[in-house]
Image (spheres, coloured by chain):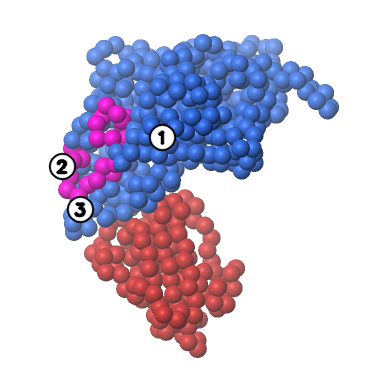
């Protein structure tokens, strides 16, 4: 099977990139779509859509089973995707890449498998107050079942982690530390490398939620030195239904399986079984093969752009958005004030207009898609003293002109609400 | 489909009718919309077969709060029989604008609280309160 790889040459031009994304040509409510919700899910380039199509048209069969040609090709396609992902995050070995459904499942896999085997009553798990529900609820469940303790690193008013409190919590000798690389609400980029080193010095295992960082920043798991790193395909130009768990090999090998079934076993008798090698030990059942192929194509696409370029483009568009949003009266921006400390995510409120009303007006009158609500981070919203915020988020295809439409829409909302 | 914010909706939002609490309500109920945090609580005073007074408090988007305000106007002074029959169509008609599927929950939050209070007061059977989820 041929992989669809598009190699882009410099200079990278956002207008040109946009032509790779079919959905960006559509209209909503008679207006060109302005898609500012990539932190929730990114759009897909043709290369990804066609890679999955091509796989189904020419190659599909079940993997790791058939001794016939197309099954071997499908298996090779799946494993090639795994290798691409491994290289993308600079994992030492492909077997450290476990395919899951999404970040949530990756974190749950660790919470159930590693957590059950290693966490006992009274053990401490350190999280932060800016976690997405997916990096909070699995640990709550684990703590409820084991009697472990949860502690949280609080935030500064600007939305940075209080690292002095983090250091104090580490002194209590936590078994596990889990935190996000980049906040999906505030955009805050946490100093992961330093935090991992500190946690390791304290003897803790570290899980990094990279759902918001893997798509947007150069990510080097060896440099970060985290034990587990989790992210989703659909936020990084890939399809839904495929996610990644990267793990340190010794840990993965020592962990019991998560789900039982086909593909994850070496041998099965009626009363017991033995487990397959990594990574298949954790991939019970027929995997999302086409989705893996799509993710591989997304990785190719991002590599062709260059993750340094992606970060730089988003830094620039975020700086522009911060500047433009600050011109809107009665608009409050949450999170770090400098674009250096944040990714392409901006949460805000406008006067006392409820974010849902704001999102409706932007959608109906301007074709602008933003997120409104608690962004699956209710504890964080509570700390901000808010029920909901509006959130605009950016990606490789975001244009400054789209920020202008957003700003125009916000001014219109002020007019409608007579503010 | 355009969901424009008509002036009367904003008027109900900015200046809600029947806002506040009753001193001795027959029944009090409240609910929230977990998706967006909209909240509504409602007090009803039922005397004989009539809802003689109604008050609500809440916070949330213009749609949820205006719809609840309009609903209280439909409830005030009406017979229990009429109030029990109030449904989604009445809300949509009062709002008078197309409500997008994602905002239906906002529009019907007050209605849900009304029927909850009627059930609590024993004036309506739970199965007839007609609150299917509009998951969208």
The reply to whether the magenta stretch includes residue A334 is yes
Residue closest to the eye, B102 or A374:
A374
What residue range appears in magenta? Answer: A324-348
Residue B2 x, y percent position in the rendering: 30, 53
Tell which circle, 1 or 3, labels the residue nearer the N-terminal end: 1
Q: Is residue A11 left or right of residue A294?
A: left
Which is in the foreground here, disc 3 or disc 2?
2
Residue B83 x, y percent position in the rendering: 46, 77
Chain in red, by letter, is B
Residue at the right extreme?
A270
Residue closest to the eye, A137 or A243:
A137
Element class at badge 2? loop
Chain in blue, by letter, is A
Which image quarter: residue B111?
Answer: bottom left
3 and 2 marks in contact (CB < 8 Å): no
Name the residue located 47 percent from the left edge and 33 percent from the top edge: A169
Q: Is residue B76 left or right of residue A14?
A: right
Q: Report in which chain the residue with disc 1 lies.
A: A
Find disc 2 in the rendering and name its residue.
Answer: A327
Find disc 1 in the rendering and name its residue.
Answer: A165
Would residue A222 be visible to someone looking at this image? yes
Q: Do discs 1 and 3 belong to a common subunit? A: yes
Q: Please, is residue A416 above or below residue A4 in the view?
A: below
Q: Report in which chain the residue with disc 2 lies.
A: A
Tell which circle, 2 or 1, labels the residue nearer the N-terminal end: 1
What is the C-alpha distance between the residues marked 3 and 2? 13 Å
Which is in the foreground here, disc 2 or disc 1?
1
Find disc 3 in the rendering and name its residue.
Answer: A414
Tell which circle, 3 or 2, labels the residue nearer the N-terminal end: 2
């Amino acid at each position: 099977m041929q992989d669809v790889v598009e190699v882009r040459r410099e200079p990278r031009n956002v207008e040109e990139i946009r032509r790779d994304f079919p959905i960006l040509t559509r209209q909503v409510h008679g207006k060109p779509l302005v898609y500012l919700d990539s932190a929730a899910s990114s759009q897909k380039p043709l290369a990804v859509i066609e890679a999955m199509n091509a796989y189904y048209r020419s190659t599909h069969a079940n993997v790791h089973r058939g001794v016939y040609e197309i099954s071997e090709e499908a298996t090779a396609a799946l494993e090639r995707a795994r290798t691409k992902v491994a290289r993308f995050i600079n994992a030492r070995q492909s077997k450290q890449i476990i395919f899951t459904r999404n970040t949530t499942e990756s974190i749950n896999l660790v919470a159930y498998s590693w957590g059950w085997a290693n966490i006992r009553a009274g053990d401490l798990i350190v999280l932060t107050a800016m976690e997405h529900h997916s990096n909070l609820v699995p640990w709550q469940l684990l703590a409820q079942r084991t009697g472990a303790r949860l502690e949280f690193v609080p935030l500064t008013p600007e939305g940075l982690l209080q690292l002095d409190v983090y250091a104090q919590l580490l002194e209590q000798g936590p078994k596990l530390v889990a935190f996000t690389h980049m906040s999906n609400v505030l955009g805050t980029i946490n100093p992961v490398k330093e935090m991992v080193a500190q946690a390791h010095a304290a003897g803790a295992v570290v899980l990094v939620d990279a759902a918001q960082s893997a798509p947007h920043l150069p990510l080097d798991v060896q440099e970060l030195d985290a034990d587990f790193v989790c992210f989703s395909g659909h936020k990084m130009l890939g399809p839904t239904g495929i996610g990644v768990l990267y793990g340190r090999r010794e840990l993965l090998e020592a962990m019991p399986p998560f789900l039982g079934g086909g593909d994850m076993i070496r041998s099965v008798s009626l009363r017991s079984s033995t487990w397959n090698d990594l990574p298949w030990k954790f991939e019970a059942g027929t995997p999302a093969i086409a989705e893996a192929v799509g993710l591989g194509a997304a990785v190719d696409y991002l590599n062709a752009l260059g993750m340094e370029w992606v970060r730089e483009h988003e830094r620039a568009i975020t700086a522009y958005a911060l500047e433009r949003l600050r011109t809107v009266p009665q608009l409050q921006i949450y999170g770090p004030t400098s674009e250096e400390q944040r990714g392409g995510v901006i949460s805000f409120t406008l006067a006392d207009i409820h974010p849902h009303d704001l999102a409706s007006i932007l959608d109906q009158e301007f074709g602008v898609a933003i997120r409104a609500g608690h962004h699956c981070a209710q504890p964080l919203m509570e700390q901000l003293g808010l029920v909901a915020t509006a959130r605009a988020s950016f990606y490789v295809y975001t244009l400054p002109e789209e920020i202008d439409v957003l700003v125009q829409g916000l001014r219109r909302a002020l007019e409608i609400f007579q503010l | 489909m355009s969901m424009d914010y008509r002036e009367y909706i904003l008027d109900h939002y900015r200046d809600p009718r029947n806002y506040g609490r009753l001193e001795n309500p027959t029944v009090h109920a409240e609910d929230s919309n977990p998706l967006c945090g909209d909240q509504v609580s409602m007090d009803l005073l039922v005397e004989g077969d009539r809802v003689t007074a109604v008050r609500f408090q809440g916070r949330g988007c213009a749609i949820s709060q205006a719809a609840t305000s309009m609903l209280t106007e439909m409830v005030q002074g009406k017979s229990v029989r009429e109030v029990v029959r109030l449904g989604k169509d009445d809300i949509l008609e009062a709002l008078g604008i197309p409500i997008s599927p994602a905002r239906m929950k906002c529009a019907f939050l007050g209605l849900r609280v009304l029927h909850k209070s009627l059930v609590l007061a024993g004036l309506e059977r739970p199965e007839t309160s007609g609150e299917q989820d509009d998951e969208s």
